[in-house]
Image (spheres, rainbow, N blue to C red):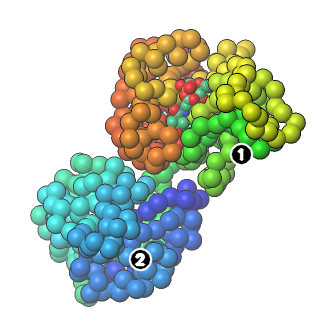
């Protein structure tokens, strides 16, 4: 269940007597380290109060699609992007039918349409309703679209019938949810990731730096952990919390980042350079604060920093090496030239001139450039993109390892 740590889960509750178990499910998911936001349909509120779920999840419950106050907090599209997983428990026959026909007539169905996150349903209904051919048709349709069904269980039902249709118990559901996060594609591998900016000091109080927030690199570290890797995250100064189960090495300058990258490089299978490293640093760091003088123009003398990712890619203990390319135009051409010049296996190019992606934002959109392919991944949250990127990197690195 540790895979649920820091995971963002939307718990959808629809109308059914099993909704009383959703309170315990919220508690179990939170206990496993997940951040849970609850979304209830109107029918669900007839069975359990939003206040109970608010108290247990620690967040206001989302109830309406057209709620201006809720939209001002976290709008429904934002919520759909925020989620790592949508778990609907209980999922009624009516909800399954609406989801199967692609309806977006309330908040929960709309979230399901708008999200890229996996959707899991825990059906709960009378055994005859479950066996009904319409429900079974909807089930097949949903499964064919990648929706996962947890259960239902078999046994005595609240209405007195016995058969298939019981919602699985909260612990079982949490365990199944946690299994959604285990791809295992990097099982046994060690991954080094650089993240954030570097700071190149001018004097004791000033430095040269850039706007990297570290979000992309940290999301990659979390996704690599979920894929089973051992992760060393070499991070410049950022305002993010260290991901769980990751070895974090804090650095400030490019030279320190290089030193951390080369330390134990022989153990590294995959190196991912997401950091925005300063290309130059001041030739000298003043011992005392530089004073304002009479001159109108001040000249700074800079010297080139070592290229960390190129040093790694040309090392005798070379791992599978992935660089990023922050470009403002001709994305693929510049990425290809970086691939060749730095001797990389893969370049992940992002257009940092575009609003809403790149430096500092929660979203990104990238193009993967290798010697023989170009693949574009559309804009989504850095967290979701990172999962996709790790799966792409794992596939390519594992193929290289097999052929060598
Ligand atoms: O941190 P965020 O706010 O989430 O933003 C993410 C990001 C935009 C910083 C990230 O997606 C990104 O593009 N990182 C690379 C930024 C960059 O410095 O790109 P570049 O084109 O200048 O460098 C190319 C590659 O060489 C990068 O992998 C970089 O880490 C590496 N490099 C550059 C210079 C240097 N001296 N050493 C390096 O290793």
Circle on res. 38? none
Image coordinates for residue 203, horizontal then vertical, percent:
80, 37
Circle on res. 248? 1
Which residue: 19% across, 53% down? 141
Q: Residue furthest right?
A: 287
Which residue: 24% across, 69% down? 65
Residue nearest the viewer, comparing 136 with 36: 36
Which residue: 67% across, 21% down? 307
Q: Residue furthest front?
A: 294
Label 1 crowd (10 A; few <14 / some 14-19 / many >=20): some
Label 2 crowd (10 A; few <14 / some 14-19 / many >=20): some
Q: Dot 2: what SS? A: loop
Image coordinates for residue 15, horizontal then vertical, percent:
25, 79
Residue 260 in which image quadrant = top right
Badge 2 is on which residue? Answer: 60
Image coordinates for residue 79, horizontal then vertical, percent:
36, 61
Quadrant position of the C terminus in the picture: top right
- Is 337 drawn above or below residue 271 in the view shown? above
Left or right: residue 16 versus residue 278 is left
Residue nearest the viewer, comparing 263 with 310: 310
- Rendering quadrant holding ligand 1: top right
Q: How many marks?
A: 2
* Residue 30 visible in the current orientation: yes
Say which label, 2 or 1, has the lower sequence index: 2
CA distance separating discs 2 and 1 = 33 Å
Which residue: 34% across, 49% down? 116
Residue nearest the viewer, comparing 247 with 161: 247
């Amino acid at each position: 269940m540790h895979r649920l740590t820091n995971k963002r889960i939307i718990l959808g509750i629809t109308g059914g007597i099993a909704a009383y178990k959703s309170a315990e499910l919220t508690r179990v998911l939170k206990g496993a380290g997940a951040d849970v936001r609850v979304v209830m349909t109107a029918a669900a509120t007839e069975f359990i109060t939003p206040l109970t779920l608010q108290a247990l999840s620690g967040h206001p419950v989302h109830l309406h699609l057209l709620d201006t106050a809720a939209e001002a907090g976290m709008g429904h599209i934002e919520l759909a992007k925020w989620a790592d997983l949508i778990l609907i428990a209980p999922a009624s026959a009516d909800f399954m039918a609406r989801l199967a026909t692609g309806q977006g007539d309330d908040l929960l169905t709309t979230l399901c349409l708008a999200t890229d996150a996996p959707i899991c349903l825990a059906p709960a209904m009378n055994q005859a309703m479950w066996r009904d051919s319409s429900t079974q048709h909807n089930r097949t349709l949903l499964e064919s679209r990648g929706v996962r069904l947890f259960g239902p269980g078999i046994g005595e039902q609240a209405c007195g019938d016995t058969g298939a249709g019981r919602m699985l118990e909260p612990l079982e559901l949490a365990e199944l949810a946690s299994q959604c996060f285990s791809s295992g594609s990097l099982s046994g591998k060690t991954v080094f990731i650089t993240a954030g900016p570097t700071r190149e000091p001018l004097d004791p109080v000033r430095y040269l730096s850039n706007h990297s927030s570290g979000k992309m690199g940290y999301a990659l570290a979390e996704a690599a952990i979920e894929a089973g890797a051992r992760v060393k995250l070499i991070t410049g100064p950022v305002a993010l919390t260290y991901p769980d189960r990751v070895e974090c090495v804090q650095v400030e300058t490019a030279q320190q980042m290089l030193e951390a990258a080369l330390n134990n490089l022989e153990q590294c299978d995959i190196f991912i350079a997401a950091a925005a490293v300063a290309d130059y640093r001041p030739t000298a760091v003043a011992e005392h604060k530089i004073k304002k003088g009479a001159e109108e123009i001040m000249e700074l003398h800079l010297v080139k920093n070592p290229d960390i990712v190129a040093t790694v890619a040309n090392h005798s203990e070379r791992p599978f090496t992935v660089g990023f390319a922050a470009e403002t135009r001709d994305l693929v051409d510049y990425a290809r030239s970086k691939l060749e010049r730095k001797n990389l296996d893969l370049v992940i190019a992002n257009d940092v001139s575009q609003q809403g992606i790149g430096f500092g934002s929660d979203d990104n959109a990238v193009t993967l450039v290798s010697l023989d392919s170009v693949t574009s991944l559309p804009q989504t949250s850095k967290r979701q993109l990172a999962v996709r990127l790790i799966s792409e990197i794992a596939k390519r690195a594992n193929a290289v390892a097999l052929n060598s």
